[in-house]
Amino acid sequence: MKGTGETGQTRRQRLNSHRFNIKHGNTDVPVAANFCSNTHSIKDLQVSVLKGNFKTQQERKEWEFKLMRKFNTLNCGLNRDRSLMSRYDFN
């Protein structure tokens, strides 16, 4: 299952955060909830950086939403909401 996320953290920090949430069963976080409700192990977790070097947080969040739409992770993935872009109707 795929998910798209943005962060101001380094890749290592973000991956460690996902690992921590999975290990401690924090089901409030979509990635951990998926791992805790399925037969996944931490070895199944993969993270890829698709874009970086954003000038602003707004630009980063806009790209996150573009990628959510491109990979259809709102309807068929880990993304639960449109975060910053929730006020817009893109259907």
Image (cartoon, rainbow, N blue to C red):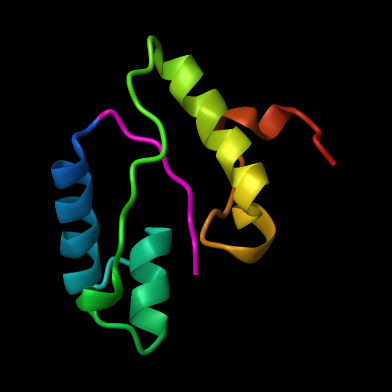
The reply to whether residue 24 is visible in this rendering is no
- Taking the spot 38% from the left edge, 63% from the top edge, the residue there is 31
The correct choice, above or below, for 8 with respect to 41 in the image is above
The correct choice, above or below, for 46 with respect to 12 in the image is below
The correct choice, above or below, for 16 with respect to 36 in the image is above
- Taking the spot 61% from the left edge, 40% from the top edge, the residue there is 82
Nearest the eye: 33 or 65 = 65
Secondary structure mostly taken by the magenta-highlighted segment of the chain = loop
- Taking the spot 66% from the left edge, 54% from the top edge, the residue there is 72
The correct choice, above or below, for 57 with respect to 46 in the image is above
Side of 24 where 50 appears, left or right? right
Q: Position of residue 47 (x, y in %)?
A: 31, 55
Side of 15 where 39 appears, left or right? right
Q: Position of residue 11 (x, y in %)?
A: 21, 42
Quarter of the view holding residue 51: top left
Q: Is residue 6 magenta?
A: yes
Side of 70 where 61 appears, left or right? left
Callout count: 0
Quarter of the view holding residue 38: bottom left
Nearest the eye: 21 or 41 = 41
Magenta residues (range): 1-8
Question: Which residue is farthest top?
Answer: 55
Q: Position of residue 7 (x, y in %)?
A: 33, 34
Question: Which residue is farthest bottom?
Answer: 39
Q: Is residue 47 magenta?
A: no
Q: Quadrant of the C terminus?
A: top right
